[in-house]
Image (cartoon, helix red, strand yellow):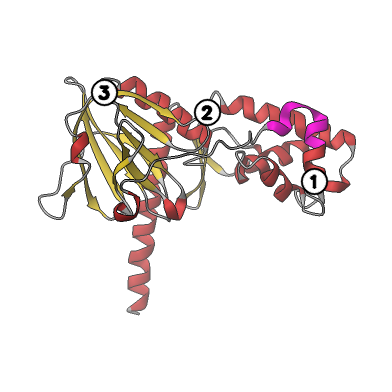
Amino acid sequence: MLTHYFTLQSLAHSFNERLHNATLQEIFTQQRNELLISCSTGTDACTLCVSCDPRMNYIFLRNPIARAKKNSVDLFTEAISKCIESISVHPFDRILQIKLEDGRMLCYQPFGMMANVILLDQHLVISDAFKRKKDLMGKTFEVTRKENSLKALVSVDAFKEALREEGTKNLFTAMKNTMPGVGSTIAREVLHRSRIDEKTPARTLGREEIEEIHRRLGEVLKELTSPRPTLYHRGGAPRIFSLIPLQHFTGSRAETFSDVNDAVRTYVIQSFRTQAIDAEKNLLLSKI
């Protein structure tokens, strides 16, 4: 859920509160697939860490990062010294938008293998890009207005009809197809609370079961608007990041946070630490 729509919304709100009117001091990279955006308000300095790594897309705010003397490259020079007017999430897609005082806009697209950061001019034309720059520059930025992924929530009958259209697919798959904005973690949580096996064929559900899933889905979505970020661990490694406590992970070691940005940052740092330890173990094993 690091780049779930609700996560990005919460992060954008937090970033906007802290970075409104902040000045972009530097934008650079010193590690493959990671962009660092240094900001200052005069009394406060911080760095936005943005990952376009296919293995883990993320964005979080942290204390200033000391720039390496070697192997760092300046990027998006047209945006340097500009003030941030606002930070928000695009209404139709998982795109975090940093609007600048001159009308330009930095957009983070956490789209897995296609993740990118692009700079738009005042006419929404791509003037620079972190990845695939040659292919994108000069193209007009467009976001297709997607059909409301939660339209099935309008009524129990609408939800029932949406599931019926999924035919013989199991309930878990049907829910994700019907409401792609929900995601795997939330779909599993809803079905767990409904006490219905996720492998149940969607078309075999009775009215009462559909009503219960519909009710639980509304319940979970309401909780997502007031995040209680939680990390679930397996062994010493973080396994799941969630915006809300998950009942289907009851019994797992959980770490709760009062702030979504802190939770995302902790998850990323702990994940990297675990990967480094595993890499060192594998190196030692290869020498035995």
189 vs 231, nearest the viewer: 189
Of residues 29 and 248, the one nearer the viewer is 29
| Boundaries of the magenta span | 151-160
**Left/right of residue 82 with respect to residue 55 in the rendered view:** left
- Mark 1, residues whose alpha carbon is within 10 Å: few (<14), some, or many (≥20)? few
Label 2 residue SS: loop
Numbered label tally: 3
Residue 170 locus on image (x, y percent): 77, 52
Image x and y of residue 182, in percent:
62, 39
Q: Amino acid at mark 2?
A: Arg
Given this view, does label 1 or label 2 mark the residue nearer the observer? Answer: 1
Amino acid type of the residue tagged 3 in the rendering: Glu
In the picture of the structure, the residue carrying the numbered disc 2 is 228
Real-space CA distance between mark 1 and mark 2, rounded to the nearest whole angstrom: 34 Å
To which residue does mark 3 refer? 101
SS at mark 3?
A: loop
The residue that label 1 is drawn on is 165
| Rendered residue at 72%/48% (across/down) | 172
